[in-house]
Image (tube, rainbow, N blue to C red):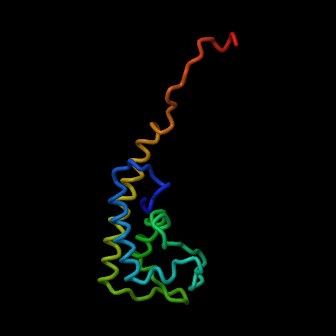
């Protein structure tokens, strides 16, 4: 069992790296208090709630997270102004987020490269009778 079971093929060689990079990113999100806001009960009443508490949510939103943190849009105070995030925490969060994003892209690229093989019919018996005669 992996954190990403059902999302990606079990033979994807990047899954272990994906889990490890997700774990590092999740730890940095906790240290930076991201998980205090990005949860289903929406304690800060964000107009557009972006969930980050599961690996699948984080993987889907990683580009937005990086952009918002780089532009100092996150974290923000209840009234919508940017909140202070210690520069050391911000740098670590961006480092882990960027690493996680790189692995997410590797996983997706591998999946795309191998998806055509997943749908090829196997052991299909060809009819000996041409369709025009059926």
Q: Is residue 31 left or right of residue 78?
A: left
Screen quadrant of the C terminus: top right
Q: Relative to residue 105, is residue 41 depicted above or below?
A: below
Rendered location of residue 112, percent (x, y): 44, 45
**What residue is at 45 percent from the left and 82 percent from the top?**
75
From the viewer's perspective, is residue 54 above or below residue 74? above
For the point 38% across and 67% down, which residue is it? 22
Give the side of residue 117 with respect to residue 99, left or right: right
Q: Nearer the viewer, residue 84 or 122?
A: 122
In this rendering, the answer to whether 84 lies above or below 63 is below
**How far from the left and from the top, in percent, is residue 9?**
44, 49
> In percent of the image, x 46 and y 38: which residue is there?
116
Q: Residue at x 46, y 79 (%)?
A: 73
Residue 15 percent location from the top left of the image? 37, 56
Determine whether, in the image, residue 27 is placed left or right of residue 122.
left
Instruction: Pick out the residue farthest to the front.
Output: 1
Outermost residue on the right side: it is 134
Q: How many marks?
A: 0
Residue 48 placement: quadrant: bottom right
């Amino acid at each position: 069992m992996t954190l990403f079971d059902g999302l990606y093929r079990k033979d994807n060689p990047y899954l272990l790296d994906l889990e490890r990079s997700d774990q590092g990113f999740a730890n940095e999100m906790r240290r930076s208090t991201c998980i205090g806001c990005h949860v289903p009960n929406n304690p800060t009443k964000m107009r557009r709630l972006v969930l980050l508490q599961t690996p699948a949510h984080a993987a889907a939103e990683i580009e937005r997270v990086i952009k918002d943190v780089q532009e100092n849009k996150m974290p923000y105070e209840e009234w919508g102004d940017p909140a202070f995030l210690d520069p050391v925490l911000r740098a670590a969060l961006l480092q882990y987020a960027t690493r996680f994003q790189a692995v997410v892209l590797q996983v997706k690229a591998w999946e795309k490269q191998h998806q055509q093989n997943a749908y090829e019919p196997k052991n299909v018996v060809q009819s000996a009778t041409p369709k025009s005669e059926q």
